[in-house]
Structure formats: structure tokens, C-alpha cells
Image (tube, rainbow, N blue to C red):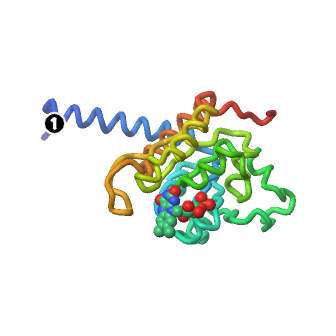
Amino acid sequence: MSFSFSFAFTRPQAYALDVAKNQSNRQSSQLSALQGRQIIVGVCGGIAAYKVADVVSNLVQAGAGVTVCMSAQAKQFVTPLTFQTLSGQPVRDDLFNLTDASDPQHIALTEQADLLLVAPATAHLIAKVAHGLCDDIISLMICAAACPVLFAPAMNNRMWANPVTQENVAKLQALGYPFVGPESGFLACRNIGPGRLSETAQIIEKITQLLHDPAKSTTRSKSK
Ligand SMILES: Cc1cc2nc3c(=O)[nH]c(=O)nc-3n(C[C@H](O)[C@H](O)[C@H](O)COP(=O)(O)O)c2cc1C
């Protein structure tokens, strides 16, 4: 006895299959783009800090080496233990706590990195970087970075709309720093508007784009 199967898909089914295939192709090219790359993730003191744990986990699962830096305020929202566990690396959280004695100013770390992601990028951190300040581990690394620095801002909608924040963002963008988000939607302060951290998938997609084509971001390079 022999059986023969024939599959005929309706148009919507065929479309859904195509979408799934494209998605899986995109995901596998993202995975290979991240394999073996060194990413620094600077976590600032915003309520969306907890979402960045998911970003770190996804980067690690895609084969990237991830080092997390946290501002003092970030540690009010998520513990370093969470990020240390997910990244498998010690968390850098203090300028003067020499985790690595051979790299006292954390300069070598920035030289080895392929990309530095700041998420959530607070209004405060954006303002500091726009004014060349570097009195904490994240702003210091950005100042010394020899790789693309990607900002993923998240804040209250009025903080985002504040002309000073907008001026600082415009200044950084004009200098060639790429941004992802923020998105519009429901905010932790219960307002609805722009200020939500981009979804993990969008952040990862932007990272892979920049790794593929670093010229799309700041022109900083290891020799400059
Ligand atoms: C509960 C709470 C939530 C906050 N969420 C944000 C936020 O989402 N975005 C932001 O820019 N600032 C937020 N802030 C303010 C920052 O924590 C504050 O500006 C801090 O100085 C940022 O420090 P950092 O940029 O060095 O991490 C929040 C403060 C509190 C108390």
C-alpha cells in the first residue's frame, strides 16, 4: 500500500509561510553577524533597565561576548548580579574599582569592542555625552570608544520632548551617533507618548546593521 500526500496552500497560508521563512532567514543572518563580536552594554538609571536584561540574553545567545557597565543609578533598578549572570562577565560599575588591573581606565575594553550600546539611554546620560562629560563608567567609555556607539533612549514623554533633550540628541546625531527609538506607547509613568525603549528585536536588528556597516555611524576608529 502506498500513500501520496500533496500540499496545497491557500494564498494567506503561502504568505504566512513566506513571512516565516524571511523572518528565519533574517534571524539566522543576525545570528552570524553577532557570532564572536564584542559588545559593551551601558545600562543607565531608567525604569526600562529591566528590559535590557533581555537584550543582553539575546546577544549572548547569538554568540556575542557581552560586557555590561552600569551607572550607580542603574543599580537602583536592576542588580549587577542579573547582568553578570546573563553575560557571564563581571559587571563594570565603578570608575575606580579596578576589575581588570591591566586596564585601569577601561580603555582596552573599549578598544576591543565592536559596538557600545547604551540602553536605556537616560536624558541625563545623553546630556552628559553631548557636553563631553565623562565622570562615570558609561560616559567615560563613550568618550574613549573606538567603535560605533548606539543610543537606545527611554524616558517620560515630556523628558523626551524637552527642548534641551532634543537639542542634545540632535547634537549627538549630527556628530554621527546612531539612535534606535524611542517608540511611542504606554510609558511606566502611565502616560502615552514617545519614550518607550525599542523592542529587543529592533535593538538587535540595529546592532547587526551597524556591525555590518559601521560607516553608518560615528566615524570613530581604533586609530583616531
Ligand atoms: C522610578 C524612576 C524612574 C526613572 N526612569 C527614568 C527613565 O526612564 N529615563 C530617564 O531618562 N530617567 C529616568 N529617571 C531619572 C534618572 O534615574 C536620573 O536622571 C538619574 O540621574 C540617571 O542617572 P544615569 O544617567 O547616570 O544612569 C527615573 C528616576 C526614577 C526615580
Residue that sits furthest to the right in the current view: 102
Residue 57 vs 174, above or below: the answer is: below
Task: Identify the image quadrant of the N terminus.
Answer: top left
Tell me the residue at 26%/36% (across/down).
Answer: 17
Q: How many marks?
A: 1
Tell me the residue at 67%/62% (across/down).
Answer: 89
Tell me the residue at 81%/62% (across/down).
Answer: 100
Give the image location of residue 119, x and y in percent.
54, 53
Quarter-of-image position of residue 36: top right
Residue 221 at least partly seen: yes
Quarter-of-image position of residue 149: top right
Tell me the residue at 77%/36% (across/down).
Answer: 222
Residue 69 vs 141, above or below: the answer is: below
- Drawn side of residue 205 relative to residue 22, left or right: right
Task: Identify the image quadrant of the C terminus.
Answer: top right
Residue that sits furthest to the front in the current view: 163
Residue 50 at least partly seen: no
- Drawn side of residue 43 relative to residue 182, left or right: right
Quarter-of-image position of residue 148: top right
| Secondary structure type for disc 1 | loop
Which residue lies under the disc numbered 1?
Answer: 5
Give the image location of residue 203, x and y in percent.
48, 45
61 vs 115, nearest the viewer: 115
Give the image location of residue 42, x and y in percent.
62, 55
> At label 1, which amino acid type do we have?
Phe
Residue 16 vs 54, above or below: the answer is: above
Give the image location of residue 7, x and y in percent.
17, 34
Q: Residues within 10 Å of mark 1 (few under 14, many from 20)?
A: few
- Drawn side of residue 46 relative to residue 177, left or right: left
Residue 98 vs 25, above or below: the answer is: below
